[in-house]
């Protein structure tokens, strides 16, 4: 596991991935990524949902995969440190 990279997903959701979405499994997983920054309040979103599993599968998961692909397609040292910086910024000022 790396510091930056797509967060590992629960097997039940990975089984729903399309072939295109499975590309996120080809890179080393990490602790933080664009999806972690964007969905820092994921538990809150799901807690308010009438059907959390449906909201996750149909809205959150596809968006998180799209954000993961953004990193995968633009991997560089600059991108790596940009994600670290954005993570620290989000932790320090969560409402931004």
Image (cartoon, rainbow, N blue to C red):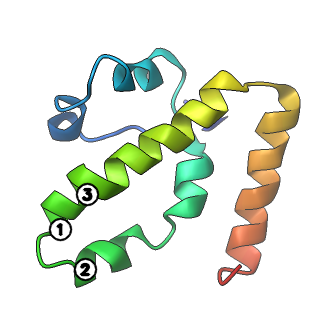
Helix, strand or loop at label 2? It is helix
Query: Can you give x and y, in whole percent of width and height, for residue 11 in the image?
Result: 20, 34
The answer to whether any part of residue 75 appears in the image is yes
Quadrant containing the C terminus in the rendered view? bottom right
Q: Are marks 1 and 3 in contact (CB under 8 Å)?
A: yes
The residue where tag 2 is placed is: 47
Q: Quadrant of residue 13?
A: top left
Give the Cα distance between marks 2 and 1.
7 Å
Q: Do the numbered discs 2 and 1 sit on residues whose CB atoms are within 8 Å? A: yes
For the N terminus, which image quadrant? top right
Residue positioned most to the right: 78
Query: Left or right: where does residue 14 sit relative to residue 43?
Result: left
The residue under label 3 is: 56
Determine the secondary structure under disc 3: helix
Label 2 CA crowd tier, 10 Å (few <14, some 14–19, many 20+): few
Q: Residue at x 70, y 70 (%)?
A: 90
Query: How many numbered tags mark residues here?
Result: 3
Mark toward the start of the polypeptide (2 vs 1): 2
Residue 93 lies, with reference to residue 86, above or below; the image says below
Return the residue found at the far left: 51
- Residue 58's place in the image compared with 8, above or below, is below
Tell me if residue 7 can be seen: no
Picture coordinates of residue 93, whole percent (x, y): 74, 81
Disc 1 secondary structure class: helix
Dividing the picture into quadrants, the one containing residue 70 is top right
In the picture, the disc for residue 52 is: 1
Measured in 3D between alpha carbons, the distance from the residue under mark 1 to the one under mark 3, in whole angstroms, is 6 Å
- For label 3, the crowd category at 10 Å Cα-Cα, with few meaning under 14, some 14 to 19 and many 20 or more, is some
Left or right: where does residue 67 sit relative to residue 23? right
**Residue 3: image x %, image y %?**
65, 39
């Amino acid at each position: 596991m790396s510091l930056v990279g797509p967060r590992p997903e629960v097997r039940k959701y990975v089984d729903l991935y399309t072939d295109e979405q499975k590309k996120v499994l080809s890179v080393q997983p990490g602790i933080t990524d664009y999806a972690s920054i964007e969905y820092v309040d994921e538990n809150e979103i799901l807690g308010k949902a009438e059907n959390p599993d449906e909201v996750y599968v149909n809205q959150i998961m596809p968006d998180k995969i799209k954000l993961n692909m953004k990193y995968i397609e633009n991997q560089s040292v600059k991108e790596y440190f940009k994600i670290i910086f954005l993570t620290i910024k989000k932790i320090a000022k969560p409402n931004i």
